[in-house]
Image (cartoon, rainbow, N blue to C red):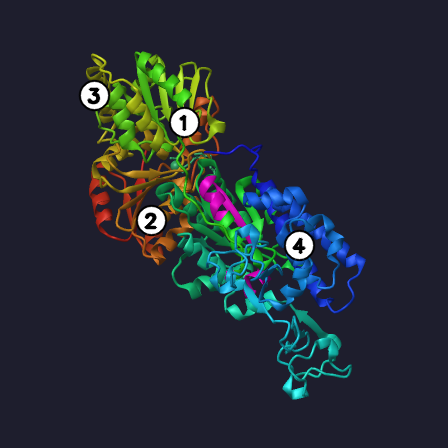
């Protein structure tokens, strides 16, 4: 699921390009505004040159972007499109069109200029483009004589893509009043002088240009001199009248994209965003005790549901605290949106309080990474962040400076993009044929289901039944099918059964559906492999691989249809024998009399007791090893920190799981080391009333490290843990706590905890040794 850094769609490049585009658009708006201010002056060569440069810049862009064929052809022949020339003429009524004789062959003749001034014209408040009703708009196929009101609602400004609502009618030639009335703001008291309305208190008639005011004219509110006034841009006025802030627009945008869950920790540089959540009222906002938990929870939420949750923290330490959780998401291909406050724009740079270079900090973690440095960019960058997170399965980060969060913003004049779902990918016919031939001639094929096939369990089973092959799974795909199914032979890898290893090693063809090929799964790479993956960069693992670039949901049924039906004599009996031997081994290990309690016994009790549809959140360590090997999944779902393997994942994941599936039982299986990294947030579960059962396998050791030291012939050192009384801690937090030391008590306590409907910790004192 990962993307190569060298991919041509490299987010860093795209992001910079996007910023360049927007900067360029902004400069164009500013330049054209400047030109409008000077419309009464004689146009001089310098301004004409400047406009020509800008038009050329747009033209280059225009020729390279999507536009209709006619417009492209025109642009190629002439070097400029007609609407740009319209714009030029509109802004420069006095400009000699012969300066552009090259363009005259395809543009309205100069005669039109006079007519255009008398026509109804509409100006885009974002980029300054003018739509002329009589001329129409060729690049959007808007016919001449089309009144603006009759243009379809979805029509966009052909220059900047602003919506129709961003346009306002320009006064006609015969009408009185200024052609382009402006508003001026007093920088002392904020009073606004409108050229259109004039100023009754100083007897300034409507239509009086600011430049025409007497030199001794004073601000009617504070008495400031004319020099204290600055011009207010039209789009700024539109923003201020909208009643929404940038933060409001972001939170609305999240909801519009289906994101209604935010984990975070507030502070100075995120106050605007937090207040927007409060005002909105439809987004669930979970305030955690440590920023890392916010990111871990958001990662787990996506791994469990496929939906995106957001994290929201402050600049600097808030942002850095997210790093491990976001890295977990990156490694496991989970989509997460990280919204981070940033210091006010003027404090950007070194030595600012809580200021860090967030763009640089997040770059290695993210598939999309940007800062909203201009409010007009808000929806474009937000929609783009969500697109990248969704389609490139990773973390998208947006920093929003404190001052920008609070600025007013009219969302209707923001550019935006729609967020599309994951496209289905079907492998090419030649590769499919090759795969079919390999399947048809295989004698002992084995199916390995990975996390990429997690939602295609039925298709995996149908395929394996059609070609009569056993199914092994990676650890992350454990439970894709019930583990007691006759065709499913457990996990392959270091937590798997010897039987799974035998089947994989003796196979003459491995069919791998969405498998990550980690070293823990240890797929035999000398064997021919049919590899199905949505990421072409990951295809081609092993020496004899038939790569199928496709989504499992599309590809597996195709393979099933293409492959001939097979029956392998004796296989069913052999698989039954293997399963029996493995289950007997697990039973034998689950010693019900051993004190301290043996981990395999805990797994047996949990296998027998946890509801068939519960959600299990795992931590990292021996607890995870025993779960992978000895717990037997029915239809439960589980999540863990797969590739990053970070301690402290299990508990925040349980918070996310309960929010995602409030109707299901949520169980966190963790170690005493892992839980103590996340335990501050037990109060979060209590505060938000998130019932769950936390089972701490308390071996008073960093158990897995103890094992690793032994395996590498190091003496045990630095692995002992001094623990608090976890049950008392649960009580103190407002939850419930149990301590279990006797194996006979475990099942009863688990059942009681499941029935309590509140956050519960079961502190199970257990044996740290792997093998007795
Ligand atoms: C953040 C982090 N630090 C260190 C490790 C290395 N590590 C892996 S397992 C483990 C021990 C975990 O101890 P505990 O939670 O008590 O689980 P146990 O192995 O005892 O079941 C450690 C330290 C890690 N995976 N993640
Ligand atoms: Mg431990």
Q: Nearer the viewer, residue 647 or 443?
A: 443
In the rendered image of this protein, does residue 202 appear above or below residue 406?
below
Q: Are marks 4 and 1 in contact (CB under 8 Å)?
A: no
Q: Position of residue 381 (x, y in %)?
A: 54, 51
Tell me the CA gap for discs 1 and 3: 38 Å
Q: Position of residue 152 (x, y in %)?
A: 46, 58
Judged from the image, the secondary structure of the residue bearing numbered disc 2 is: helix
Q: Is label 4's Cβ within 8 Å of ligand 1?
A: no
Instruction: Tell me which numbered mark, 1 or 3, is placed earlier along the sequence.
Output: 1
Of labels 3 and 2, the one closer to you: 2
Of labels 1 and 2, the one closer to you: 1
Q: Which residue is mark 1?
A: 427
Q: Residues within 10 Å of mark 1 (few under 14, many from 20)?
A: some
Describe residue 498's horizontal placement relative to residue 351 as left or right. Answer: left
Tell me the CA gap for discs 3 and 2: 36 Å
Instruction: Tell me which numbered mark, 2 or 4, is placed earlier along the sequence.
Output: 4
Q: Quadrant of the C terminus?
A: top left
Q: Which residue is mark 4?
A: 85
Of labels 4 and 1, the one closer to you: 4
Q: Are marks 3 and 2 in contact (CB under 8 Å)?
A: no
Q: Position of residue 22 (x, y in %)?
A: 62, 52
Q: Position of residue 527 (x, y in %)?
A: 40, 14
Which span of residues is magenta-colored? 385-412
Q: Which residue is mark 3?
A: 580
């Amino acid at each position: 699921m990962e993307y190569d850094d060298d991919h041509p769609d490299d987010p860093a490049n795209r992001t910079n390009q996007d910023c360049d585009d927007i900067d360029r658009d902004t400069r164009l708006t500013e330049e054209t505004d400047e030109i409008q201010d000077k419309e009464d002056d004689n146009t001089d060569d310098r301004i004409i040159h400047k406009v020509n440069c800008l038009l050329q810049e747009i033209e280059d862009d225009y020729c390279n972007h999507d536009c209709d064929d006619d417009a492209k052809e025109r642009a190629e022949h002439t070097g400029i499109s007609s609407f740009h020339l319209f714009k030029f003429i509109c802004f420069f009524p006095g400009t000699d069109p012969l300066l552009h004789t090259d363009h005259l062959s395809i543009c309205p003749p100069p005669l039109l200029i006079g007519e255009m001034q008398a026509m109804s014209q509409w100006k885009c408040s974002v980029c300054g483009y003018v739509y002329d009703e009589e001329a129409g708009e060729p690049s959007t196929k808007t016919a001449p004589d089309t009144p603006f009101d009759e243009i379809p609602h979805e029509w966009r400004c052909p220059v900047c893509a602003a919506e129709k609502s961003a346009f306002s009618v320009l006064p006609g030639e015969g009408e009185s009043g200024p052609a382009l009335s402006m508003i001026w703001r007093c920088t002392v008291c904020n009073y606004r002088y409108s050229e259109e309305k004039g100023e009754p208190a100083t007897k300034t008639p409507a239509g009086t240009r600011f430049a025409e005011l007497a030199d001794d004219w004073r601000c009617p509110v504070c008495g400031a001199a004319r020099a204290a006034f600055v011009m207010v841009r039209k789009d700024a006025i539109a923003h201020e009248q909208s009643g929404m802030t940038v933060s409001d627009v972001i939170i609305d945008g999240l909801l519009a994209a289906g994101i209604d869950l935010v984990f975070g920790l507030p502070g100075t540089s995120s106050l605007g965003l937090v207040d927007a959540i409060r005002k909105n009222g439809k987004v669930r906002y979970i305030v955690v005790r440590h920023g890392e938990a916010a990111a871990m929870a958001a990662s787990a939420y996506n791994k469990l549901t496929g939906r995106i949750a957001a994290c929201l923290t402050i600049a600097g330490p808030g942002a850095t605290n997210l790093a491990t959780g976001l890295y977990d998401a990156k490694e496991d291909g989970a989509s997460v949106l990280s919204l981070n406050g940033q210091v006010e724009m003027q404090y950007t740079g070194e030595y600012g309080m809580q200021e860090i270079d967030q763009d640089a900090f997040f770059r290695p973690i993210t598939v999309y990474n940007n800062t909203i440095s201009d409010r007009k960019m808000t929806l474009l960058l937000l929609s783009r962040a969500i697109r990248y997170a969704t389609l490139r399965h990773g973390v998208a980060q947006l920093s929003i400076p404190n001052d920008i969060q609070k600025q007013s913003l009219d969302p209707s004049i923001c550019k935006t993009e729609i967020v599309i779902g994951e496209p289905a990918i079907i492998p090419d016919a030649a590769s499919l044929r090759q795969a079919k031939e390999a399947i048809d001639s295989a004698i002992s094929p084995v199916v390995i289901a990975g996390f990429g096939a997690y939602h295609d369990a039925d298709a995996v089973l149908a395929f394996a039944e059609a070609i009569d092959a056993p199914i092994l799974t990676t650890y992350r795909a454990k439970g894709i099918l019930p583990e007691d199914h006759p065709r499913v032979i457990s996990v392959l890898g270091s937590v798997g059964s010897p039987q799974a290893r035998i089947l994989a090693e003796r196979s003459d063809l491995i069919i791998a559906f969405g498998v990550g090929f980690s070293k823990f799964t240890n797929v035999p790479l000398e064997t021919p492999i049919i590899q199905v993956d949505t990421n072409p960069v990951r295809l081609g693992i092993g020496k004899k691989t038939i790569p199928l670039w496709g989504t499992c949901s599309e590809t597996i049924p195709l393979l099933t249809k293409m492959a001939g039906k097979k029956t392998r004599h004796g296989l069913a009996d052999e698989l039954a024998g293997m399963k029996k031997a493995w289950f007997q081994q697990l039973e034998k290990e689950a010693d019900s009399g051993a004190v301290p309690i043996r981990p395999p016994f805990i797994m047996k009790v949990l296998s027998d007791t946890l509801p068939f549809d519960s959600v299990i959140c795992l931590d990292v360590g021996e607890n995870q090893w025993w779960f992978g090997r000895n717990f037997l999944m029915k239809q439960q779902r589980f999540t863990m920190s797969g590739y990053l393997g970070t301690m402290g994942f299990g508990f925040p994941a349980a918070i996310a799981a309960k929010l995602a599936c409030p109707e299901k039982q949520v169980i966190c299986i963790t170690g005493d080391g892992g839980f103590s990294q996340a335990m501050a947030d037990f109060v979060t579960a209590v505060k938000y009333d998130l019932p769950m059962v936390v089972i701490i396998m308390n071996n008073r050791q960093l158990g897995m490290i103890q094992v690793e030291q032994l395996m590498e012939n190091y003496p045990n050192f630095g692995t002992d843990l001094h623990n608090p009384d976890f049950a008392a801690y649960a009580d103190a937090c407002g939850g419930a706590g149990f301590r279990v030391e006797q194996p006979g008590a475990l099942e009863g306590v688990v059942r009681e905890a499941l029935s309590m409907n509140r956050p519960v910790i079961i502190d199970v004192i257990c044996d740290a040794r792997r093998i007795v």
